[in-house]
Image: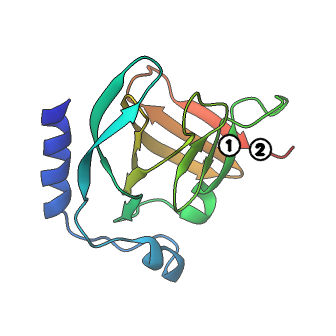
Amino acid sequence: MQKKLNYFLITSLILINFSCNDGKKNDVLNSKAPPELKADSIKSKNEIENIERPEKTIIRNLAVDTTKVFGIWTQDSNGPHADFWLTKKSFYVVNYDGDGAMPYVLEKNEITLFYDDFIQKGLITSAENDTLKIKWSDHKNETEYVKFKN
């Protein structure tokens, strides 16, 4: 895991900035600073994990339109609550056992989430018509979310 994270950081540092899909709105979000990860002791359900995570969310080199990606999302439009709320500051997991708001890295269309006790990566494949599709690295199939409207 550490080797993959180090590779991600090195690769991220040498990438060329690409222009954003939605112009000036994304320019404000695009960070040109390298990711600043720190070892963070966080109390998880059963133990203390030391994971490297950014102190705050990092968004840069966007290949997705954040006006379509940011929002409150659910897999079940008839369900009683949403699954997560994605903002420019955090990825907030609803009903998470612990602190639901966590920093993330959004690089091009790749999202990396820093939970209390693990890191999850995904590829945003589509964000159109109030539908968000993410191919999570630990799932075989793409996950489809719809805007939460309750």
Q: Nearer the viewer, residue 23 or 50?
A: 50
Quick one: quadrant of the C terminus? Answer: top right
Indicate the amino acid at tag 2: Phe
> Could one spot residue 109 in this view of the protein?
no
Left/right placement of residue 7 relative to residue 83 reads: left
Q: Which numbered circle lies on residue 148?
A: 2
Q: Is residue 16 above or below residue 105?
A: below
> Could one spot residue 121 in this view of the protein?
yes
Residue ranking furthest to the top? 46
| Mark 1, residue position | 73
- Residue 98 placed where, x, y %? 55, 32
Q: Residue at x 78, y 34 (%)?
A: 81
Q: Are marks 1 and 2 in contact (CB under 8 Å)?
A: yes
Considering only order in the chain, which callout, 2 or 1, is on the residue closer to the N terminus? Answer: 1
Q: Nearer the viewer, residue 111 or 118?
A: 118
Q: How is the image coloured?
A: rainbow
Left/right placement of residue 83 relative to residue 124 reads: right
Q: Residue at x 20, y 29 (%)?
A: 1
Circle 1 SS class: strand
Left/right placement of residue 33 relative to residue 42 reads: left
- Residue 111 placed where, x, y %? 41, 46
Q: Is residue 83 above or below residue 128?
A: above
- Residue 118 placed where, x, y %? 37, 29
The image shows a total of numbered marks equal to 2
Report the Cα–Cα distance between label 1 and label 2: 5 Å
Q: Residues within 10 Å of mark 2 (few under 14, many from 20)?
A: many
- Residue 88 placed where, x, y %? 53, 62
Q: Residue at x 20, y 57 (%)?
A: 12
Q: Which numbered circle lies on residue 34?
A: none
Indicate the amino acid at tag 1: Trp
